[in-house]
Every structure is written in structure tokens, then in C-alpha cells.
């Protein structure tokens, strides 16, 4: 059900884009036919140039209609980024057609001005047709701009730009025809040449439009990033807590969709889950700059500037997909000695486990050359569920443990004592209440000392697990 609104919005977008493109195409057919008929009957190069311009607009409108139908298709196995580039390509074709129009208009206008004079006979129909075409161009330009802005469609925007400039070029042609009429009425030969001059002005407008379209479509086809957007993304992402560096920020556009991919440097000791959370934050930040952008974030591990020796040791273990704990570093006469517990797969034998430890220790020395020696306690990482019996209460063990707890004034209470027997071994666990503000290092020392004392007093106990709790969470 969550995808239904998105699907409805997609269908609405397709319908609106196709409807406005189809209406524009039919309007182009009508305008082209009217201009061609009037241009031939009057001999006006201005109207004929406008007819040629409108004919190419008709072709461009058809290309736009086809492109918006194709570009809205979803991505598939052969087009992983979708079909949006079709819109950019159609705009590029429109640019070429416009330039061809300019070549013909300029050539014919120059010929009429300097080599072959053509007598123009403006008729009322010519003025009516040009006025009607201006009204139609204004209507479809406005409709195209609205939908183009709504869905960020470059193909529809190109059409809208065409037809908005057609209004001005048609106005210039009307002005040229008016000047020709004045020249005939008052016998002013110089004014009779106003028509080819108006045609040249039309060509100038078309060249201007073509240049604007060419730059935008070529940028889109060459995957040029929108001006200033990359800098905005770099600035916004760099401010995120946890991002150490940013590299290879790349942005491309296909139709009305943007795609961004970037490398983000994260501290090498962050967990996989935290890296995913940071990637989501980066994606949301980029979408505030470019809404609805498709983002790919590649996380790259980096050494943070504030790493201490413990972080560097753990980083080596993590890089080898191993867990290390109880890391202890002693400074003895200026020489650093490391002791650590390393968890290995319990299916390994001693030789295999020792080889792994030897390799990891060598890597740690290379990573932290100030280390003088490393001593590693090998622990097997359990992967087997053991079966056993739970003894709900053992009054003798509880009494002995309570007597030992009384030796530690920081321990305010002991409760939930559980005794389990697994493979003829006794496991004991309990909860100990301590002060809220007791430092964790002290909590660990007390827990370790309790475990040692418990096992000294009850050698039959194989393992002790103490769960410390703050006083506020255990008011009794």
C-alpha cells in the first residue's frame, strides 16, 4: 500500500506531460499550415521563414511527444539509469533543426536583399494568421512551461522556450509587413525591404534560442553537474558529524532525474550499522540540495585524527574480522607492552589459531610501531548452543556469595542469583547494584574482583557473570 501514492503520482505526471506535448504538436500542425498558405500567397519571406520555423517546431513537438513517452519508462536491465536521457537527446535534435532553419532564412534573406528582389503583397489574411499564431504560441508556451516546471522536464522546457520566442518573432514579422504596406502606400522603396530584414531578425532570435538550448542539452548529455550544486553538496555533507572526508562527488542528469554518487571517509572503527546510518544521513542531506536525487554512498574507512593506541589496535582486529577485548597497555621504562584477548573460531585447532594470532600481532606492530611486545590470550568464539540444567535456587552458594559481596562497600545489593549446570560445569550469574556515578573503569574492577573472590571461595564454579546495575534502576 505504501507504493500506491507514488504510483498514482507517477501516472499523473505521465498523463500531464503527454497531454501537453500532444496538444502542442496538434497546435504546431495548425500554425504551420496557416503560415505556409499565407506565405506562399503573399510571397513574404518573413512569413515563409516563420512557416519553416513552425514546421521544424512541429517536428520538434513530435520528437518531444515521443521523448516524454519513452523517458517516463522505468529502469530496466539494459537501461539501469532509466530512459530520461531521451528527453535530453530530443532537445539536442531540436537545436540542430533550429540551426538548419537559421541557415535557410539567412541565405534567402541575403539573396532577396542583394540579388533578387521579391515584391511582397501583404494581405489581411497574413496579418490575421500571424496574430492567431501569436495567440496560440502564447497559450501552448504557458501550458508547456507550467508542466515543465512542475516535473523538471527539459524536453517540455525546450518546447516552451521555442514557442515563447515564436511570439516575438511573429511580432517582428507583423511589424515588417506593416512597414512594407507603408512603403507601398507612400512609394518609399527603402521600406519595401523591411520583410527580409524582419526575416533576418527572426533568424537572430532562433540562433539565440538555439545557443541557449545547445549549451543546456550538451551539458546534460555530457553529464555536467548543475552550476554550484556540487559545492553545496560538499559543504553540507562535510558538516555532518562522523564524516571525516569527502571524495569523488559526481552528479549526472537523465531527463528530470539526478543521480549522485560519492565516497565518504568514515572512522575505521565504526560498526557496519553505524556506517549505514551515516550513509542515510548523507543521502538525506544531499536530497535537501537536490530533491528526489538517486544517491549512492560508498563508505571508505579512514584513520581518525584523534585515534589512541587502543583504537589503532582494535582497528587492526576489525580489519581482520576479529573481536578483541580486555586490551591492556603498560608503559614499562618507556616501552609499551600490550596484553589482549582475541576471539577465534572454535573450530580451529591450536596451530591454526596461533598462526592467525601471529599474523595479527605482526600487523599490529606495523600499524603501531611504538609497541614493544604483544601477548595475546586466545579465546574460542562459541558457535554451539550448549544444553544444561538450571538450578533455580542454591541457598549455600547464595549465602557464600552474599558474605563476599559484603567485603565490597561499593556493591549496594546483590539479587537475581542464578546457577546453571552445563556439561558438569557450574555457571553462576547475578545482578549487583552500585552507585549511579561510579566510573565504568571502577565498575569493571569491582566486577572482576568479585568474580575472582567467588571462584576462590567456591572452586567448583567454572564461570561467573556479574551484571552491574545503577541504583536508580533498581530501587527496592
Image (cartoon, rainbow, N blue to C red):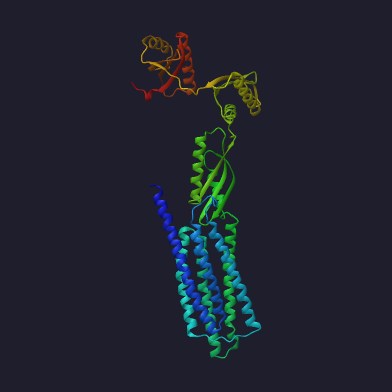
Let me know if residue 395 appears in the view.
yes
Between 333 and 99, the one nearer to me in the picture: 99
Image vertical order of residue 70 relative to residue 236, above or below: below
Image vertical order of residue 239 relative to residue 342, above or below: below
Between 422 and 9, the one nearer to me in the picture: 422
Seen as rendered, the residue at the extreme left is 476
Q: Position of residue 425 (x, y in %)?
A: 45, 13
To which quarter of the image does residue 432 belong?
top left
The quarter in which the C terminus is drawn is top left
Between 161 and 188, the one nearer to me in the picture: 161
Q: Position of residue 364 (x, y in %)?
A: 63, 26
Q: Position of residue 390 (x, y in %)?
A: 39, 16
Q: Relative to 20, is 115 on the left or the right? A: right
**Numbered label tally:** 0
Name the residue at 42% across, 13% down: 405
Image vertical order of residue 89 relative to residue 113, above or below: above
Q: Position of residue 33 (x, y in %)?
A: 50, 77
Let me know if residue 338 appears in the view.
no
Name the residue at 62% across, 85% down: 117
Amino acid at each position: 500500500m505504501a507504493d500506491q501514492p507514488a504510483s498514482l503520482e507517477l501516472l499523473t505526471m505521465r498523463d500531464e506531460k503527454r497531454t501537453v506535448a500532444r496538444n502542442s504538436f496538434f497546435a504546431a500542425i495548425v500554425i504551420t499550415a496557416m503560415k505556409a498558405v499565407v506565405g506562399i500567397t503573399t510571397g513574404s519571406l518573413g512569413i515563409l521563414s516563420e512557416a519553416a520555423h513552425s514546421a521544424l517546431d512541429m517536428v520538434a513537438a513530435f520528437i518531444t511527444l515521443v521523448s516524454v513517452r519513452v523517458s517516463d519508462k522505468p529502469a530496466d536491465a539494459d537501461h539501469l539509469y532509466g530512459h530520461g536521457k531521451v528527453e535530453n537527446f530530443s532537445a539536442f535534435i531540436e537545436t540542430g533543426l533550429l540551426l538548419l532553419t537559421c541557415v535557410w532564412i539567412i541565405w534567402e534573406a541575403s539573396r532577396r536583399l542583394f540579388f533578387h528582389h521579391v515584391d511582397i503583397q501583404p494581405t489581411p489574411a497574413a496579418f490575421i494568421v500571424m496574430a492567431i499564431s501569436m495567440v496560440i504560441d502564447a497559450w501552448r508556451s504557458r501550458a508547456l512551461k507550467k508542466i515543465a516546471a512542475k516535473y523538471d522536464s527539459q524536453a517540455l522546457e525546450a518546447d516552451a522556450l521555442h514557442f515563447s520566442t515564436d511570439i516575438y518573432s511573429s511580432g517582428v514579422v507583423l511589424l515588417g509587413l506593416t512597414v512594407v504596406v507603408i512603403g507601398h502606400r507612400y512609394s518609399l522603396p527603402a521600406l519595401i525591404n523591411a520583410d527580409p530584414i524582419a526575416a533576418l531578425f527572426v533568424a537572430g532570435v532562433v540562433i539565440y534560442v538555439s545557443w541557449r538550448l545547445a549549451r543546456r542539452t550538451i551539458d546534460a548529455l555530457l553529464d555536467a553537474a548543475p552550476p554550484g550544486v556540487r559545492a553545496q553538496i560538499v559543504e553540507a555533507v562535510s558538516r555532518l558529524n562522523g564524516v571525516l572526508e569527502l571524495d569523488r562527488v559526481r552528479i549526472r542528469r537523465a531527463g528530470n532525474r539526478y543521480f549522485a554518487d560519492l565516497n565518504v571517509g568514515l572512522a575505521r572503527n565504526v560498526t557496519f550499522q553505524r556506517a549505514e546510518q551515516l550513509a542515510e544521513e548523507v543521502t538525506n542531506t544531499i536530497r535537501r540540495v537536490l530533491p528526489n536525487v538517486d544517491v549512492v554512498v560508498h563508505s571508505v574507512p579512514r584513520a581518525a585524527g584523534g585515534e589512541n593506541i587502543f583504537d589503532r589496535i582494535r582497528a587492526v582486529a576489525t580489519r581482520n574480522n576479529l573481536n578483541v577485548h580486555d586490551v591492556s597497555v603498560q608503559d614499562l621504562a618507556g616501552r609499551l607492552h600490550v596484553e589482549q584477548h582475541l576471539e577465534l573460531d572454535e573450530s580451529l585447532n591450536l596451530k591454526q589459531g596461533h598462526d592467525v594470532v601471529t599474523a595479527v600481532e605482526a600487523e599490529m606492530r606495523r600499524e603501531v610501531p611504538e609497541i614493544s611486545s604483544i601477548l595475546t590470550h586466545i579465546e574460542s568464539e562459541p558457535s554451539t548452543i550448549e544444553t544444561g540444567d538450571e538450578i533455580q535456587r542454591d541457598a549455600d552458594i547464595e549465602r557464600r556469595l552474599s558474605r563476599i559481596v559484603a567485603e565490597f562497600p561499593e556493591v549496594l545489593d546483590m539479587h537475581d542469583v542464578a546457577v546453571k549446570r552445563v556439561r558438569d560445569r557450574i555457571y553462576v550469574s547475578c545482578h549487583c547494584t552500585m552507585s549511579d556515578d561510579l566510573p565504568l573503569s571502577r565498575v569493571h574492577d569491582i566486577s572482576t574482583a568479585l568474580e575472582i573472590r567467588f571462584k576462590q571461595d567456591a572452586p567448583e564454579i567454572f564461570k561467573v557473570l556479574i551484571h552491574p546495575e545503577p541504583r536508580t534502576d533498581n530501587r527496592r
